[in-house]
């Protein structure tokens, strides 16, 4: 498999000053992280809140600028390119967010929400857009009759399917899944995970799968990176991390689900 995303010694720190007379405090949100994502592979980032997982997602998507290190996307160094330059690459790497109400404009219909990325990235001709919306809805398991509804007329699981449809609308090859099922009912979580697995195979996708739930990551990913205080304290094949873990923090995470 070819490497499609390569991260080298990536770091992000924030400088905090609580008052006029206090000394500056440096928070190391991500610290010297290195990994490669290969075509068709899924890497899980696991760790408790504050471990640096979401900061890592924002760095990969260039929503945050790194303090140091390198990010190569499909062989091109995107670490310090401008926002206008990055816009050309956004169709290749998309994100599925945790909370649907933060992403879906309540004043837009499902059809309008799906047409938006198609127009921005010029995915299909204007004459093909309506049929492309129908195709996307079918791919994520929604009826085409749902396209004229608004987000508040859909269930949480249906809205998450709309977000997934927006992510795959650009023909992205890398999807960052940032806690994609944690806000859903347990009964719906399995359906969404099965959908993501199906789409990975059908569309030849690669995932960066972020979660605090080790069971979810173990089910979805080929490799697991355990994050603690911004660092990868353990990284390897899923089986090795689950059954031959070396770091105490990983062992505590495993004990919590047994």
Image: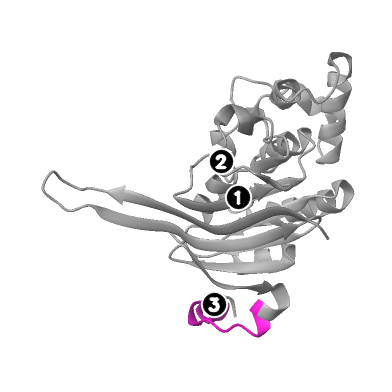
Residue at disc 1, secondary structure: strand
Within 10 Å of disc 2 (Cα), the crowding (few <14, some 14-19, many 20+) is many
Observer-nearest of 176 and 9 = 9
Which circle, 2 or 1, is nearer the viewer?
1
Total residue callouts: 3
Which circle, 2 or 3, is nearer the viewer?
2
Q: Main secondary structure of the magenta part?
A: helix
Q: Which mark is residue 192?
A: none
Q: Which residues are magenta?
A: 241-256
Q: Position of residue 87 (x, y in %)?
A: 64, 30
- Tell me the quarter of the image containing the C terminus: bottom right
Tell which residue pokes out farthest to the top in this image.
127
Gap between marks 2 and 1 measured at Cα: 9 Å
Q: Are marks 2 and 3 in contact (CB under 8 Å)?
A: no
Gap between marks 2 and 3 measured at Cα: 28 Å
Q: Which mark is residue 250?
A: 3
What residue is drawn where x is 56% and y is 35%? 101
Q: Which mark is residue 62?
A: 2
Residue 68 versus residue 164 in the image, above or below: below
Q: Quadrant of residue 163?
A: top right
Q: Which residue is mark 1?
A: 71
Residue at disc 2, secondary structure: loop
Report if residue 142 lies within the magenta region: no
């Amino acid at each position: 498999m070819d490497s499609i995303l390569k991260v080298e010694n990536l770091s992000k720190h924030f400088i905090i000053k609580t008052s006029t007379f206090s000394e500056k405090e440096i928070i190391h949100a991500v610290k010297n992280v290195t990994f490669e994502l290969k075509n068709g592979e899924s890497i899980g980032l696991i760790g408790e809140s504050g471990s640096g997982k979401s900061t890592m997602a924002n760095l990969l998507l260039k929503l945050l600028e790194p303090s140091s290190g390198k990010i190569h996307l499909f062989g091109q160094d995107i670490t310090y390119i401008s926002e206008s330059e990055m816009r050309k690459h956004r169709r290749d790497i998309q994100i599925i967010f945790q909370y649907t109400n933060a992403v879906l404009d309540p004043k837009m219909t499902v059809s309008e929400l799906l047409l938006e990325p198609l127009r921005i990235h010029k995915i299909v001709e204007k004459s093909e857009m309506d049929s492309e919306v129908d195709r996307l809805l079918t791919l994520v398991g929604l009826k085409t009759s749902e396209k004229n509804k608004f987000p508040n007329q859909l269930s949480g699981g249906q809205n998450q399917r709309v977000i997934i449809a927006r992510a795959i609308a650009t023909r992205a090859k890398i999807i960052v899944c940032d806690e994609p099922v944690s806000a859903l009912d347990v009964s719906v979580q399995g359906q969404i995970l099965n959908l993501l697995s199906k789409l990975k195979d059908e569309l030849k996708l690669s995932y960066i799968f972020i979660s605090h739930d080790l069971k979810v990551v173990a089910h979805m990913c080929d490799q697991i990176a355990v994050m603690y205080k911004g660092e990868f304290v353990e990284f390897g094949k899923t089986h090795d991390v689950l059954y031959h873990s070396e770091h105490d923090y990983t062992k505590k995470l495993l004990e919590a689900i047994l």
